[in-house]
Amino acid sequence: MIRTEHLTKIYRMGDTEVYALNDVNLEITEGEFVAVIGPSGSGKSTLLNMIGCLDTPTSGSVYIDNVNTATLNENQLAEIRRKKIGFIFQQFNLVHTLDAVENVALPLFFSGVRRDLRLKKAKELLESVGLGNRVHHKPAELSGGQQQRVAIARALSNDPEVVIADEPTGNVDSETGNTIMDVLQGLNKDGRTIIVVTHDPEIAARATRTQRMRDGKLLA
């Protein structure tokens, strides 16, 4: 489903070149649950941004369903992000003026789904992550773990084939982190491809495959 070939990302600061990614070759098959683990600054999040079509490489390629994303224009990349990929971020990135159900329904608004249908689906998704009694609570009225589960429900709103999670347990306690991983494991059992970035070996152990990174490179 996902393949990177000689993926390289270089940031230039004056005369200095910093390799955030350095010749990364990775294959992820449909239905896998892959954890990418490494210390801060190892290139994990940069790799996710490339796979998720949020950033472009300096050189190399990212293939999604055998399509080289480097050949796509912005509208085509946005279509892939909207239809194929669900994103979960460490900082939740919820809209604080909207309640839980409105946050989850937001991607469906941009997909042109009718209001009653998108709110119905959003409520069903919140129920699926154990928040059926919190649909009209705003983010400030929810715990960190509850906010992250709202973010997971939002990531699922367009039925993505791939769920990408960048440090999804980074801002919650260990018990809540395990609950979030339970949800991701359940999604994987339902057939979705899951890619999680983490620095926590215990979280990585919940995946079916682990890839380690250091200094922009995948380690054997």
Image (cartoon, grey):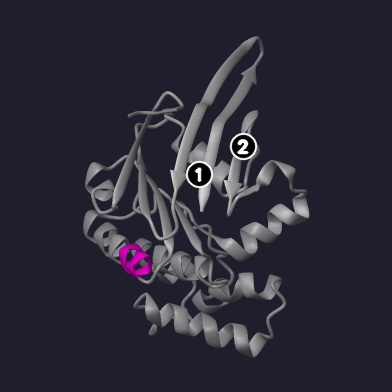
Highlighted magenta segment, given as a residue range: 183-189
- Give the main secondary structure, helix, strand or loop, of the magenta stretch: helix
The residue located at (55%, 34%) in the rendering is: 5
Residue underneath mark 1: 48
Q: Is residue 173 left or right of residue 121?
A: left
Report which quarter residue 182 is drawn in.
bottom left
**Number of on-image labels:** 2
Residue underneath mark 2: 61
Q: Residue 1 location in percent, x, y?
A: 51, 54
The residue located at (65%, 58%) in the rendering is: 80
Name the secondary structure under disc 2.
strand
Q: Determine crowd level at label 1: few under 14, some 14-19, many 20+ residues with C-alpha closer than 10 A.
A: many
* Residue 9 located within the stretch drawn in magenta: no
Report which quarter residue 115 is drawn in.
bottom right
Name the secondary structure under disc 1.
helix
* Residue 187 located within the stretch drawn in magenta: yes
Rounded to the nearest angstrom, the CA distance separating label 1 from label 2 is 13 Å
The residue located at (27%, 61%) in the rendering is: 176
Q: Is residue 11 left or right of residue 125?
A: right
Query: In the displayed structure, would residue 110 be above or below residue 202?
Result: below
Query: In the displayed structure, would residue 84 be above or below residue 108?
Result: above
Q: Residue 179 location in percent, x, y?
A: 27, 64
